[in-house]
Amino acid sequence: MSSVAVLAQEAPASINAGLAAIGYGLGAIGSSIGVGLIWAAVINGTARQPEAQSKLMGIAWTTFVLVEVLALIGLVVFFIAGG
């Protein structure tokens, strides 16, 4: 077995649980701000051009899902890190 494989197996994978919690909290705040901006843009766009509401809603749901997936990835990383 090569020395690189041995070193990779022996590397400690522990991150401080407090640091992981702070990282997830920041990720959750970021995604919350993103969701607020998405829906604020939909409300403004619908108020300005009501006939474009269906197109705006499709775009909004797509971007909402992307933002929430990033928040869920942060949650998974938090639990992997030992939270």
Image: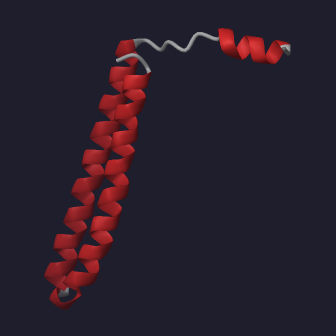
The image quarter containing residue 22 is top left
Q: Quadrant of the N terminus?
A: top right
Up-down relation of residue 81 to residue 57 (above or below): above
Using the image, determine if residue 58 lies above or below residue 6: below
Does residue 39 appear to the left or right of 78 in the view shown?
left
Q: Is residue 59 left or right of residue 47?
A: right
In this rendering, the answer to whether 11 lies above or below 21 is above
- Name which residue lies at 28% across and 82% down: 55
| Residue appearing at x 25%, y 46% in the figure | 32
The quadrant holding residue 42 is bottom left
Q: What number of labels is visible? A: 0
Taking the view exactly as shown, the residue that stands out farthest to the bottom is: 51
- Residue 50 picture location, percent across and down: 15, 87
Position in image of residue 11 (x %, y %) = 64, 11
Name of the residue lying farthest toward the right:
2
Residue placed most toward the observer, 1 or 26: 1
